[in-house]
Amino acid sequence: MAEALTLWRNGRVATCDESMTVFEQGALLTRGGRIEWVGDESALPEFRAPAEVRDLNGGWITPGLIDCHTHLVFAGTRATEYAQRLKGHTYAEIARAGGGILSTMRAVRAASEQQLFDESAPRLQALLAEGVTTIEIKSGYGLTLADEEKMLRVGRALQHAFPVTVKTTLLAAHTLPPEYKDRADDYIQVVCEDWLPRLHGEKLIDAVDVFCESIGFNLAQSESLFEAAQALGLPVKMHAEQLSNLGGSQMAARHRALSCDHLEFATAEDAASLAAAGTVAVLLPVAFYCLAEGRKPPVPALRAARTRIAIASDCNPGSSPGTSLLLAMSMATRLFGLTADEALAGVTRNAAHALGEQAARGTLEPGKAADFVIWNIRSIEELSYWIGFNPRRSVIRAGRVTL
Ligand code: DI6
Ligand code: FE
């Protein structure tokens, strides 16, 4: 029996499609979890089956928000390191002294799977409260096979427990674990030859990421990881050009990576290569703000090259301890110079591309997921305008009201 139709009428619908089409007197027809039709209510097609009618009371509608870059699963905090950074110690200095990511690694290794879930769930709920319906969650604080597996299982468990689509990413190449001190090549080899096939076999990973950086992994090690991932049919992503330029974006573009993320040290040539490869530039303004970085990503060059630009929270305990995608939108406009439309596309359509999910979600178009948000706003620009205020009225995921 066909699922019932629902007519969502009397709304102002921002589809976030490539043209950023808005229907001022718009309506949606949904069937189960899919969009069947969207447009001006005056052009509503005839439909046979009885439809439930929901009045949007003139509210603005956007696609469900997509947070395409998070390290949301972790234990403990790094507030003491933040206090040290306020006194002038640098992120890299703290990392080299055995803090930073390794500090969170010790907490994650000591935590049970349940503890990890319990500490991560409130952070996810904060993002869902702002209209997030799809989220990417990375591993990368376990740095042993068992602890990376534990993190990835928590990512999958969060999808089962909450109304959200979770895409998991293996970031075992986040930093070198102490067991492999001074043996980065050996570590990359065990990740490529042992961890990747096993975790992929357990269906725990949807993509593979690497921190290609002076305090992370070099270009050759990153490329080995990409080749191993792609040999298994897994898409790849990269933390690229965050603190320096190792040529990561160029290599990622050669491998048609889904995304390159951070990009403060990317060049105009990198922007052109990303655009040509269809690799999304994911900007992470909260990390830029928290690390008090001086150099901004080359947004004018990305715009000129027509590189897709996405924005994400980068929720993590070290460089971006935040759980607000709306704040990331505000920062992306004010700190990086994105327009309001670019910011909205950055957390919908382009964020979907950064996850390889563009066929399924990210815009309000027939055939896509019936994931959308109803907002208490007067104009769509309010979504990157308010700071610390959440104008969300309701969230619909897979055609059902979840908030
Ligand atoms: N770059 C970042 O900003 C985060 N990871 C990365 O590769 C920082 C993660 C942390 O400090 O815990
Ligand atoms: Fe990150």
Image (spheres, grey):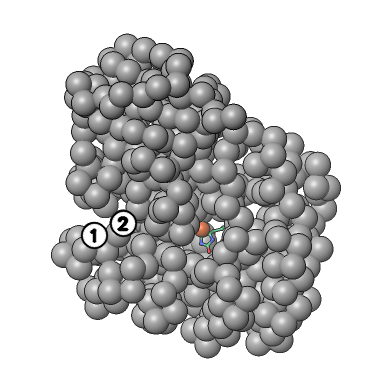
Q: Any atom of ligand 2 within 8 Å of the CB at mark 2?
A: no
Residue 48 appears left or right of 11: right
The front one of 97 and 115 is 115
Quarter of the image where the N terminus is located: top right
The residue labelled by disc 2 is: 309
**Numbered circle sitting on residue 299:** 1
The front one of 186 and 17 is 17
The amino acid beneath tag 2 is Ile
Image position, residue 401 (x, y; %):
52, 22
Quarter of the rendering containing residue 58: top left
Image position, residue 319 (x, y; %):
51, 53
Element carrying mark 1: helix
The front one of 42 and 231 is 42
Residue sitting at x 70%, y 59%: 204
The answer, for residue 383, to whether it is visible in the render is no
The amino acid beneath tag 1 is Val
Residue 106 appears left or right of 63: right
Tell me, yes or no, whether the two marked residues, 2 and 1, touch with CB atoms within 8 Å.
Answer: yes
